[in-house]
Amino acid sequence: MTEPEQLGFRALADPTRRSILRLLASQDMTIAEVAENFDMTRAAVKKHLTILDEGNLISVETDGRSRINRLNPIGLKGVFDWFSYFDAFWDSRLDTLKSEIEKDTQ
């Protein structure tokens, strides 16, 4: 696993960060707007956003004094691809199991 993938999984390991990603999936938000959805300080939310940014799961754009956070679908692709490997692995295994069960029932 590459370092960017590791940082992406680190970012996804925390339920608060996963919740933040869900929020950003619906709209871009400032730190203050994200913080309104959680019972924690803006500083704590900023730390979560920093980890999401390091994992390349969000992008941050400065607009005047505001920092706009948005979901980065390209960054999520590495995580998705990693899971896709196991999805294909289990599909293959389950197809083999199904074939064996069908042989036994004939």
Image: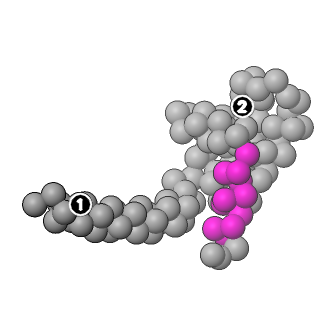
Mark 1: secondary structure:
helix
Identify the image quadrant of residue 88. Answer: bottom left
Query: What sort of colour scheme is used for the picture?
Result: one colour
Q: Residue at x 39, y 63 (%)?
A: 90
How would you rate the neighbour count of disc 2 (Cα within 10 Å): few for under 14, some for 14-19, many for 20 or more? Answer: some
Q: Main secondary structure of the magenta part?
A: helix
Q: Which residue is mark 1?
A: 101
Q: Which three-letter amino acid code belongs to the residue tagged 1?
A: Ile
Mark 2: secondary structure:
helix
Identify the image quadrant of residue 92. Answer: bottom left
* Near-viewer residue (49 or 7): 7
* Near-viewer residue (11 or 64): 11
Q: Is residue 25 above or below residue 73?
A: above
* Near-viewer residue (76 or 103): 103
Disc nearest the viewer among 2 and 1: 1
Q: Which three-letter amino acid code belongs to the residue tagged 2?
A: Val
| Separation of marks 2 and 1 at Cα, in angstroms | 50 Å
Query: Is residue 65 shown left or right of residue 99?
Result: right
Residue 24 percent location from the top left of the image: 60, 38
Residue 95 in view, yes or no: no
Q: Is residue 8 above or below residue 44?
A: below
Q: Which residue is mark 2?
A: 34
Query: Is residue 75 shown left or right of residue 103?
Result: right
Q: Which residues are the magenta region?
A: 4-14
Give the numbered dot on residue 52. none
